[in-house]
Amino acid sequence: MYRSQTAIPALRGPVPLIHLILRWFIQPGNRVVDATCGNGKDTLLLAELAGETGQVWAFDIQPEALSRTKQRLDEAGLAARVNLLAVGHEQLAAHISVPVNAAVFNLGWLPGGDRSVVTGTDTTLPALDSALQMLVPGGLLVVTCYPGHAGGDMETDAVLAWSAGLAANRFHAWRMGQLNVTTDAPFCLLIQKATTPHAP
Ligand SMILES: C[S@@+](CC[C@H](N)C(=O)[O-])C[C@H]1O[C@@H](n2cnc3c(N)ncnc32)[C@H](O)[C@@H]1O
């Protein structure tokens, strides 16, 4: 079962797969974070799934990304559900003081924008730490990594090491990537906070 879906999704690259998973997990009334709103596609989905009673926080450091996201939300009539924040996701904890059900990180650059502005290890790792701490039990952190650009490879390695180092009794960390593509193609990580921590 997947909700709010009108057509069969084409599972080309990690984002459609992530969207399928989000459709399964996010319930009306949920609080969710888009840590890199970019063109607003993920934010729009999160706003749809969180529903009228839910709340979305969407971060980006580029005014162009925020205005594209705002336009997308305005067109869908969903802007009231979203707090658009013109700050880096490394400041997540300063802006969100309640537990959240999911956080989405789509790393890299703004498609159709300035490719010199990219997410970076120094800010991504603290932001991932913050997001993980905010998750409710059973909550989900999803990260799309882009190892194919300069700097993206180092960021990807750091995020992979960070994920692999999470305590297995508290988090379920998964890696999902398409096999019949180049080895530096984007892939996604899925980290769930355990519903009940178990003995190590
Ligand atoms: C791949 S795009 C995101 C795509 C977006 N989720 C969508 O659905 O269109 C990555 C975005 O991360 C943003 N970004 C880079 N560093 C950031 C930071 N420290 N905090 C928040 N956003 C950042 C970039 O400006 C860019 O818009």
Image: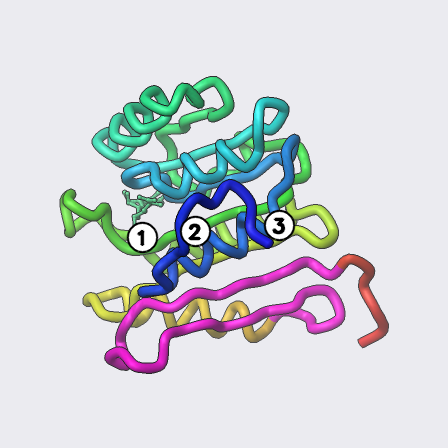
Q: Mark on residue 25?
A: 3
Q: Position of residue 174 (x, y in %)?
A: 55, 71
Closer to the camera, 149 or 111? 111
Closer to the camera, 104 or 5? 5
Labels 2 & 1 near each other (Cβ < 8 A): yes
Compared with 138, 162 (above or below) is: below
Report the span colored magenta.
166-194
The residue sitting at 46% across, 72% down in the picture is 176
Tell me where residue 200 sits by quadrant: bottom right
Q: Position of residue 96 (x, y in %)?
A: 58, 32
Drawn side of residue 39 relative to residue 121, left or right: left
Mark 1 surroundings within 10 Å by alpha-carbon count, few (fewer than 14), some (14 through 19), many (20 or more): many
Labels 1 & 3 near each other (Cβ < 8 A): no
- Which of marks 1 and 2 precedes in the sequence? 2
Q: Amino acid at mark 1?
A: Thr
Q: Amino acid at mark 3?
A: Phe
Which residue position holds label 2? 105
Drawn side of residue 44 relative to residue 99, left or right: left
Label 1 CB less than 8 angstroms from ligand 1: yes
State the SS at label 1.
loop
Q: CA distance from mark 1 to mark 3?
A: 26 Å
The residue sitting at 49% across, 38% down in the picture is 46
Labels 3 & 2 near each other (Cβ < 8 A): no
Marks 2 and 1: which is nearer the front?
Answer: 2
Taking the image as four quarters, which one is ligand 1 found in?
top left
The residue sitting at 25% across, 65% down in the picture is 151
- Which of marks 3 and 1 precedes in the sequence? 3
Which residue position holds label 1? 119
- Magenta residue check for 189: yes
- Which of marks 2 and 3 precedes in the sequence? 3
- Magenta residue check for 40: no
